[in-house]
Each structure stands twice: as structure tokens, then as C-alpha cells.
């Protein structure tokens, strides 16, 4: 028996989009062995894959992330790896993109095709959360495309739906919401059949009640892998796959992840502010895989952006979602003592019962923004008036070993909190994508500043990095200056500054910034 997984090639979901953009360069061409190798070479050329065996004469160009790698050099380095099956590398790199419904790339199917969902993702018509939500609704095992997870081995599951069901049913029997990191890692990657959901609810409570947790994990591994002596790797795979799956799931914003200060130890729950939507989804979908008789039928399904039909596409269900959001916002404002702005109150008191579908969808987006804004104001009040928390942040940032353990998005959040303490701050706007509680689900994209700061007498951007290596200046200097110049042009009414923060500013970065400050940039 094996755990289900998204990909061992592209472990970080944020890498899917750049991999997809490179595959787009080959669209319309056959995904034969030649183009499979060409795809992997293009990934190398675009700094998206770094081989282990790089000749000394090319190391400088590969170590410089801003350097353009000529195709012929990327090809020479690829050939230098002496892979037994060179084309397999390209197949493995493209596989998760097709598995997630963003493309169709396989030698036996025909020309490479980017699906409608994939094209909208590339054009950023769909932000990352919605793109992965639409994708994960279709990911199922078994399917005619994949030979890894077969029906004869017991697979019959839509993992995203099954995980929502599992957590929802656990919550119905427990005051403690959600699953711990260990519980999620044990019981979600191994949930290979939707018929096992109730059994797994029982196993969650069995684990919680066990006095010897390690003994339980070992016994569970014995049963799942059907072996008396599971290997260390098999047991480790639970946590490795669980962490990987969590990263994909949380991007959809249908799961809420609460992490410690380092972003390492976490707990996952169904997102409370989307509970009405989740209930609608769970009522319609059991987590059972759809039976496709042919590969073509499955490929048409994943290429059709309108499928599966969601309950929220029904106007009455969307009105229920809006009603729930309004009630949630008012309840949070009351319980937290956070005032609702006059402009927000006007929107919240609108009679939306006669809205058409487009109007209600737009209204729901506005409500979600109000929800985030109110929670952001509450968070600011908490941090400004919480001396203990401020001291905790100071002590954490002084501990260089602890800082190295922090995830990039958590580091950006910590610095965003710090900036809120400055008295005349009007708005601190971190650009990392957030969940419905304002918690970061990924670090800020490279096309914009990490944090934008607006004060009464000046504006600023804050650029944050955990990189302290001698390549810091290469990765950070030019993008930081470009972001500042664009920010200055956009907000020219006040003087703009840039605050650059790293655990250590490398001397090369210092000299580069100093020269640019003295002699100009961009």
C-alpha cells in the first residue's frame, strides 16, 4: 500500500506556476522524448531546476539568479548529468502540472495543451488560491491518466473533498477543532478511499486517547503498509507527505492553518468563515472518485473549467454565503470590540436578497475584504497594546538560530507586525497572500514589494529576506530598487523610503545599495 501524493518533483505548490509558464513555451508541440528533454533543459535555462553536477566553468552563471543562461549551455549541463533516461526528467517535471489540471502533456496523447484553467492561472486572471481550489476539486484517484493509484489497490477518493469531510466529522465530535500536524499527516495521505472516512474519524480519537503516541504511529504504519516492520522512510513519509499536502490545501483558503512562531508546528482546520460553502460542498460531494471509461473523457473533464458544478453557482446558495459572511463580520466585531467603519456598515446593511448572480459574487468579494480589514485593525490593536508580544518578537529576532527556522512568509508577517507599532502609521499592507484570518499562506510575489507602508508624512516599502549569503546582493539589490522606484512613481505625493531587513546584510549588498544611493538607480 502507498500514500497518495501530489508530486515528489514539485514539492512547493508555488513552483507550479513558473513550471507551467515554461511548459507554455512548448504548447502545440508533441510531448515526445525530444521535447521532454527540451522541457527539462528550459527549466534549467530559466533557473527553475539546478542540476547537481555543474562544470566549474559554468558555476558562476548558475549561481547568479539574474544571469541569463543560454540554451546551449543549459543543454550541455543537462547532458553532463548522464541520466539513464534523460527524457524521464521532463516527464516527471510536467506530470504534477497535468495531474492538477493545468496542462495536458503526455507522449501518447498528442500535442502539449495548456488548459483553460492553466491559461487563466498564467495570465493571473485567477489568483493562486482560486486556481488551486478549482484544480484540487478534480484531483482524484484512480483516474485514467495516473497508473500510480489504482482501483484494485483500494483507491477511490477525491482527496480534497475527503479531507474536508474528515475534519468536519471530527469537529462534530470534539470541542477541539481541526487536526494536529501529526493527525493530519497520518490520516490524510493514507485516506485512499472515501468509504474509510468514518473509520478514520475513529482512528483520530483513538490516537488522541493513546498513552503511547509513538507506539500508535508504528502500529498504524504496520496496518497501512501491510508489513510487520515498516521502514524508517515509510514512517517519515507520513510527515513529509502531510506537510506537502497541507501547503497545497491551505492555498485554496478552505483550510485554516495555525502555526507556531517558526511556521513549523501547525494545526489545520476547515476555514470557519467558509463553513456555509463547505457544508454545501460536503452535501453535494461525498469524496468518491468519478468513473471515467477513457483517458480522453478524463482529459476533457480536467480541461473544462466549468466542471465540477459547484453549489455556490446557484444564486440561492450564494445568497446564503453572503448572509453568513455578514453575520460573521458583525459577530467578530462585537466579540472583539473592533469598530466597523461607516463605509463598511453601509455595505453590510445592503439588501442583497434581489441581487443577480454577478452582483452577489462581487458583493461576497467585498465582504471578504471587509472581514480581512476588520481583523487587520484588531491585530494592530493587539500588537500595539501588548508589550509582552513586542518583547517576544524582539527576543525572537535577536536569536539568529531561531530566525533561521522561520518560514519566509512568517518572517514577513513578523516584520509587518513590527511596523504597525510606529505611531503615525495609517496602513501597513503586506503583499503576501492571506487566508480569511489574515494569516500568510505564502510569501509575497517577486513582482511587488514585500510590505507597503503608509504614514502621515511619508511612504515606504519594506523588503524582507532570510538570505544572508554572498548572493544576497544579486537576489535582492536590483529587485528592491525596482520596487522602490515603481512605488515612488505610484505614490508621488509624499517622499518614499525603503527599509531592507535581513538577519545579516552582506557587505556586497551594502556596497551595492550605497553606490546606488549616491549615484542613482533605475
Image (tube, rainbow, N blue to C red):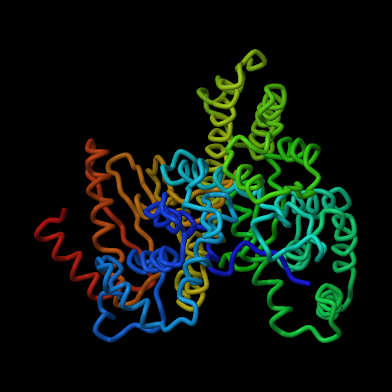
Name the residue: 77% across, 52% down: 162
Residue shown at 63% from the left, 17% from the top = 352
Residue drawn at point x = 30 percent, y = 66 percent: 475
Front-most of residues 164 and 404? 164
Tell me what residue is drawn at x 66 percent, y 44 percent: 297
Q: What is the x, y in percent for residue 377?
A: 53, 41
Measuring from the top left, give residue 346's x and y in whole percent.
55, 19
Picture quarter containing residue 54?
bottom left
- 221 relative to 68, above or below: below
Looking at the image, residue 492 sits to the left or right of residue 303; the answer is: left
115 in relation to 339, above or below: below
Image coordinates for residue 279, horizontal then vertical, percent: 77, 38
371 to the left or right of 430? right
The quarter of the picture where residue 197 lies is bottom right
Please state if 211 lies on the left or on the right of 302 as rendered.
right
Q: Is residue 365 above or below residue 188?
A: above
Name the quadrant of the N terminus.
bottom right
- Please state which of residues 173 and 229 is positioned toward the viewer in this rendering: 229
The reply to whether residue 213 is visible in this rendering is: no
Tell me where residue 153 sits by quadrant.
bottom right
Q: Given the current orientation, which residue lies at the most extreme left position?
A: 519
Residue 487 seen: yes
Residue 264, position as x, y percentages in the image: 60, 68
Amino acid at each position: 500500500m502507498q500514500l497518495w501524493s501530489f508530486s515528489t518533483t514539485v514539492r512547493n505548490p508555488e513552483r507550479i506556476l513558473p513550471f507551467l509558464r515554461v511548459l507554455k513555451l512548448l504548447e502545440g508541440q508533441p510531448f515526445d522524448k525530444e521535447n521532454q528533454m527540451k522541457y527539462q533543459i528550459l527549466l534549467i535555462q530559466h533557473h527553475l531546476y539546478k542540476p547537481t553536477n555543474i562544470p566549474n566553468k559554468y558555476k558562476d552563471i548558475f549561481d547568479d539568479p539574474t544571469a541569463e543562461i543560454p540554451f546551449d549551455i543549459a543543454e550541455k549541463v543537462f547532458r553532463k548529468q548522464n541520466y539513464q533516461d534523460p527524457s524521464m526528467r521532463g516527464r516527471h517535471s510536467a506530470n504534477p502540472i497535468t495531474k492538477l489540471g493545468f496542462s495536458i502533456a503526455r507522449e501518447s496523447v498528442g500535442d502539449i495543451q495548456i488548459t483553460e484553467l492553466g491559461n487563466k492561472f498564467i495570465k493571473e486572471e485567477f489568483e493562486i488560491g482560486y486556481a488551486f481550489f478549482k484544480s484540487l476539486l478534480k484531483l482524484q484517484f484512480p483516474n485514467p491518466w495516473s497508473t500510480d493509484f489504482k482501483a484494485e489497490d483500494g483507491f477511490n477518493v477525491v482527496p480534497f473533498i475527503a479531507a474536508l469531510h474528515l475534519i468536519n466529522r471530527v469537529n462534530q465530535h470534539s470541542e477541539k477543532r481541526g487536526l494536529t500536524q501529526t493527525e493530519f499527516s497520518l490520516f490524510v495521505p493514507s485516506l485512499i478511499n472515501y468509504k474509510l472516512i468514518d473509520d478514520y474519524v475513529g482512528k483520530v480519537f483513538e490516537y488522541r486517547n493513546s498513552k503511547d503516541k509513538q507506539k500508535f504511529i508504528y502500529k498504524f504504519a504496520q496496518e497501512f503498509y501491510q508489513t510487520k516492520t515498516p521502514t524508517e522512510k515509510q514512517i517519515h513519509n507520513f510527515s513529509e507527505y502531510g506537510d506537502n499536502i497541507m501547503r497545497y490545501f491551505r492555498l485554496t483558503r478552505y483550510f485554516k492553518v495555525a502555526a507556531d512562531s517558526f511556521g513549523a508546528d501547525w494545526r489545520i482546520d476547515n476555514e470557519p468563515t467558509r463553513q456555509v460553502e463547505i457544508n454545501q460542498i460536503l452535501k453535494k460531494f461525498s469524496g468518491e472518485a468519478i468513473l471515467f471509461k477513457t483517458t480522453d473523457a478524463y482529459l476533457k473533464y480536467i480541461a473544462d473549467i466549468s466542471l465540477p458544478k459547484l453549489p455556490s453557482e446557484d444564486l440561492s446558495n450564494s445568497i446564503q454565503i453572503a448572509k453568513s459572511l455578514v453575520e460573521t463580520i458583525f459577530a467578530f466585531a462585537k466579540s472583539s470590540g473592533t469598530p466597523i467603519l461607516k463605509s463598511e456598515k453601509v455595505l453590510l446593511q445592503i439588501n442583497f436578497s434581489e441581487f443577480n448572480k454577478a452582483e452577489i459574487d462581487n458583493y461576497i468579494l467585498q465582504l471578504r475584504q471587509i472581514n480581512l480589514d476588520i481583523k487587520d485593525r484588531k491585530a494592530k490593536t493587539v500588537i500595539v497594546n501588548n508589550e509582552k508580544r513586542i518583547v517576544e518578537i524582539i527576543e525572537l529576532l535577536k536569536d539568529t538560530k531561531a530566525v533561521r527556522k522561520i518560514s519566509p512568509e512568517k518572517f514577513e508577517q513578523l516584520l509587518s507586525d513590527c511596523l504597525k507599532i510606529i505611531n503615525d502609521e495609517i496602513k501597513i499592507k503586506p503583499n503576501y497572500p492571506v487566508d480569511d484570518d489574515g494569516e500568510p499562506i505564502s510569501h509575497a510575489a517577486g513582482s511587488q514589494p514585500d510590505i507597503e507602508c503608509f504614514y502621515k508624512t511619508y511612504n515606504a516599502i519594506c523588503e524582507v529576506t532570510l538570505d544572508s549569503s554572498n548572493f544576497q546582493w544579486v537576489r535582492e539589490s536590483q529587485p528592491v530598487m525596482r520596487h522602490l522606484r515603481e512605488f515612488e512613481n505610484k505614490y508621488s505625493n509624499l517622499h518614499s523610503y525603503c527599509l531592507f531587513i535581513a538577519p545579516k546584510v552582506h557587505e556586497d549588498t551594502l556596497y551595492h545599495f550605497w553606490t546606488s544611493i549616491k549615484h542613482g538607480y533605475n
